[in-house]
Image (tube, helix red, strand yellow):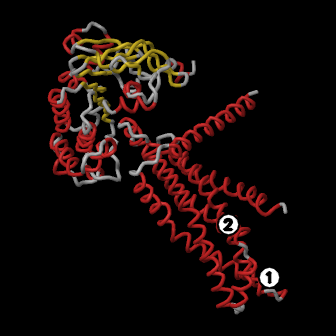
Amino acid sequence: MNNLIEIDSLTFKRGERTIYDNISLQIKEGQTTAVMGPSGIGKTTLLKLIGGQLSPTSGDIKFRGESIPNMKRSRLFNVRRQMSMLFQSGALFTDMTVFDNIAFPIREHTNLSEEFIRTVVLMKLQAVGLRGAADLMPSELSGGMARRAALARSIALDPELIMYDEPFAGQDPISMGVLVKLIKQLNNALKLTSVVVTHDVKEVMSIADYVYILAEKKIIGSGTPEEIRQSDSALVQQFLKGQADGPVPFHYPAKEITAEFLGA
Amino acid sequence: MEALAKLGRSTLDKFSALGRATFVLLGAVMSVPQLKNIPLTIKQIYVVGVQSLSIIIVSGLFIGMVMALQGYTILVDYGAEGSLGPMVALSLLRELGPVVTALLFAGRAGSALTAEIGLMKATEQLSSLEMMAVDPLRRIVAPRLWAGVISMPMLAIIFSAVGILGGHLVGVDWLGVDAGSYWSIMQSTVEWNEDVLNGFIKSIVFAFVVTWIAIFKGYDSIPTSEGISAATTQTVVYSSLAVLGLDFVLTAIMFGIE
């Protein structure tokens, strides 16, 4: 199987702070790859790097063997038509109906007739179960519906790669189940390559083909979900089991508690 | 030493902001105009222009009325109340029309533009446009820039026209200045190039600067509630200062040295 995306010794710094320190990972075509890790370690940043919205400090990111950071802007825009991203907030355009939101990328990039666009949009909405909500405004949708609508928009142009940024965050169990099912189905039916960035271990382990766990600026574990479960790394186990204390300490670094209170 | 470093850093920050602002401007102005963008621009003209009409008309009316009242009490002492017409018209066309319109526009439309673009950034709408391979500078920023540049000079003309009518209302209808002299002396004194056109040029410059500041502040805002609120305040403060400063420069160039 070919690698759709190859990240090669990537280092990324934001100001003085290092987010990633020399990481490498591959995303195989047609698979669902999960990237997990504690919050605040810049998982979204990774997606923005792949999408070319940020440039790495050093290292390279390749899409089908072509370096994304070195692309010209016009080429990058062309490549982006083959990728798609589901933002955590959904990022629906609040001044348009659900229908127009999903029609938006089609209208921007093609010259299809309105009649044809209507058919395509309704099919996409049918796929996420929201055909009946086509005329609603984004403010009238629940959180789960908004994310499904955004999902319909991100598959509007039939991309090859779809990146999910925390798709399960803040969802109730039912919409979580719906989203897990949708991601799996889309991946199978459309032969998509998916990257899911998340910290919801249980959900993502059920759909991922391959898993990377990021922590402390590095990749601390990778493998199939089964291999990850068997991992003997204390850090990986702490993350999978959700233990409060371990290699990732419960306490933010501080001076000794006796010194703090007794002034010793 | 500390203070010096601070000064240096803030100067560097200012210059890098200026650089980013230029990029935003160039990106918006240089982006290839597309037929699809014309309806977007028209919609924005409605939002920033047409919806500002009420505040512009009401302010213009009152400023014209106050000017006539103040001018009359001074001019009547010298028996020169016949010059009320040109006084009102010239102050409006040369100064108050463009300047007050720009200040009101910054408060009414500029702040709204900043907040809107800032919120789009905070809710990842700008990022998602980029990921859809749609340039937000072309899709979001450019229509708003053009709408501002087109609307404000028209608003300034309306402001001045309403102000002159307001002056007429107070001066002629209430205080009894002769209607013939109000209009005829105005007509013979006000020059097309010197006064009307120069005022119009001023308002084009102000329109450009105010809208530029507004969209840049929104685009460059820190995407949090504090960030957007600070950006909105800065838009109003910076554009007001820029308008007043530029007004002096433009006035000096246009009317200063003969």
- Mark 2, other Cα within 10 Å: few <14 / some 14–19 / many ≥20: some
Residue designated by label 1: B74
Vertical placement of residue B122 versus A68, above or below: below
Q: Residue B224: x and y, percent?
A: 47, 42
Q: Is residue B1 visible?
A: yes
Circles 2 and 1 on the same subunit: yes
Q: Residue at x 18, y 40 (%)?
A: A128
Vertical placement of residue B239 versus B122, above or below: below
A79 with respect to B165 (left or right): left
Q: Residue B27: x and y, percent?
A: 52, 41
Q: Secondary structure at mark 2?
A: helix
- Quadrant for residue A225, please give it: top left
In this view, the residue in front, A78 or A246, is A78
- Quadrant for residue A124, please give it: top left
Q: Which kind of residue does numbered mark 2 sit on?
A: Leu
Residue designated by label 2: B197
- Mark 1, other Cα within 10 Å: few <14 / some 14–19 / many ≥20: some
Q: Is residue A253 visible?
A: no
Q: Residue at x 28, y 37 (%)?
A: A154
Q: Residue at x 82, y 89 (%)?
A: B79
Distance Cα–Cα, label 2 vs label 1? 28 Å
Farthest residue to the top: give it.
A232
Q: Residue at x 59, y 49 (%)?
A: B234
Pick the quarter of the image with the N terminus of chain A: top left
- Quadrant for residue B73, please give it: bottom right
Q: Residue A55: x and y, percent?
A: 47, 24
Q: Residue B206: x and y, percent?
A: 63, 57
